[in-house]
Amino acid sequence: MRWSKIVTLIMVIAVVSLVLMLSVSPIFQKYQLTQKYFPLIKDVNLGLDLQGGVHVVLEASDTADSKVTPEAMKQLQAILQNRVDQFGVAEPIIQAQGENRMIVELAGIKDPNEAINSMVKTAFLEFKTENGETIITGKDLKDAQESKDPTSGAVEVNLTFNQEVAKKFATATTANVGRNIAIVLDGKVLQNPTVQTAITNGQARVTGYSSLEEAHNIAILLRSGALPVKVDVVEKRAVGPALGADSLDKSKYAGIVGLTAIFVFMLLYYRIPGLVANFTLIIYSFLVLLAYLSLNVTMTLPGIAGYLLSMGIAVDANVIIFERIKEELRFGKSLRASIDAGFKRGFVAVFDSNATTALAALVLVFLGTGAIKGFAVTLIIGIIASMFTAISLTRWLLHLLASTKLVKDLKYFGA
């Protein structure tokens, strides 16, 4: 490799580093240049603390048909989680408060009132005969999907029952040919069609919706099941992102200062290896960002903390390996042999520290909730990316540079 290529590599690293720092600067944000030239950053999901949303407190109460019990509250939490997940809300927080309350926090939703109304709907579906007898209920549903009739364009919800209930439905429709069977949701009659022929395929259609979105919301409620107890909204407030935005700005500046200090230290102390480490740290940042997008990770302030911590772990891995390489050089080994021995000896320490940290993070993922889980997820992703960049990419680049005239003097390797 010639001097010109080395200079080109250094310039590329410098330019990429400068652009990354500018991408989070106030100038880029003011003129929305980040969104224009860095669409990956724009597409990262932000949590409630960074983009705002809605905070809701739900209270369950006893009725003649259902009582508030610990089991009912657990079932309520599971159904609410299922409904919110299907509405596409990123990383919601749903947790119990006391014996009969549930806290729900939703980030970045377009219509908070519609989301809340959909959450608290009982969604109890019944098929009733003319004499008021209930044939089947929503508990017997296997699936519910919204669609449009290809001929008429009417919006509908297609219901599918399990095999056992399909036989029961076929018997009921056979006995009620020429009569009406009402489809009732939460005590409100959606349809009251006349049975023309027996329905033996275990399917039914519910029509009369004004839009496909309305049908989609009803289908979600039916799939998630009816709420086990009566639920009322006792508190609802909008959560602004002001505090999170201020913290995010401070995190950006802290990140810029920290990265600059790391780049300067690695370059001055380790020289050529430090230059390589700086470059791999940039690649690491891109890999982590791509992982966030691929896994649809929601970024919160604790998540940012996990990302920065994993970045520190990535730098620490390089420091351990470079110190091993310097030791091998002092023993009189050749540069290539020192690089191989340094990585071989340093790998055990790097793997051990990363593995123990990842195990601790896994515990937080399975036992933690909300922000704690977000912190752990971002930390694990960062650890995996740092292992690749520190062990594979750094080693390959050092081998590539070991054959150049620039590193014949071992002082460039900090020896």
Image (spheres, rainbow, N blue to C red):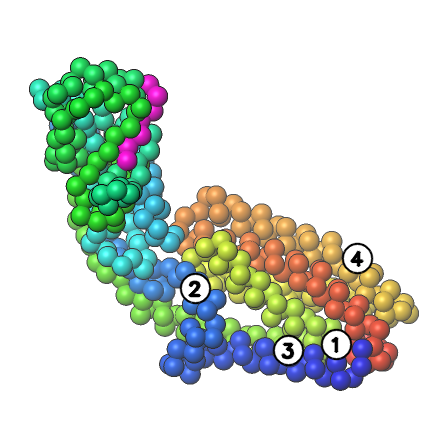
Query: Which residue of the protein is positioned furthest toward the right in this rendering?
Result: 332
Indicate the secondary structure of the residue bearing disc 1. Answer: helix
Instruction: Tell me if I can see residue 85 in this picture.
Output: yes
- The stretch of residues the image draws in magenta is 158-164
Residue in the picture at 78% in, 76% down: 414
Using the rendered image of the protein, determine whether residue 60 is visible from the camera's viewpoint.
Answer: no
Q: Residue at label 3?
A: 13
User: How many numbered discs, if any?
Assistant: 4
**Residue 18 magenta:** no
Which quarter of the rendered picture does the C terminus lie within? bottom right
Mark identifier at residue 55 = none
> Mark 4 or mark 1: which comes first in sequence?
1
In the picture, the disc for residue 43 is 2
The earlier-in-sequence mark between 2 and 4 is 2
User: Which amino acid type is marked by label 3?
Assistant: Ile
Which residue is at 85% across, 70% downward?
A: 335
- Residue 318 x %, y %: 69, 66
Given residues 269 and 46, the one toward you in this image is 46
Q: Quick one: label 4 or label 3, which is nearer the N terminus?
A: 3
Mark 1 → mark 3, Cα distance in angstroms: 13 Å
Q: How far apart are labels 4 and 1 at the CA level?
A: 20 Å
Q: Secondary structure at mark 3?
A: helix
State the separation of the CA atoms marked 2 and 4: 39 Å
**Mark 3 or mark 2, earlier in chain:** 3
Residue 26 coordinates in the image, percent (x, y):
41, 81
Residue labelled with disc 4: 344
Residues marked 2 and 4 touching at CB (< 8 Å): no
Identify the mark at residue 272; answer none if there is no mark: 1
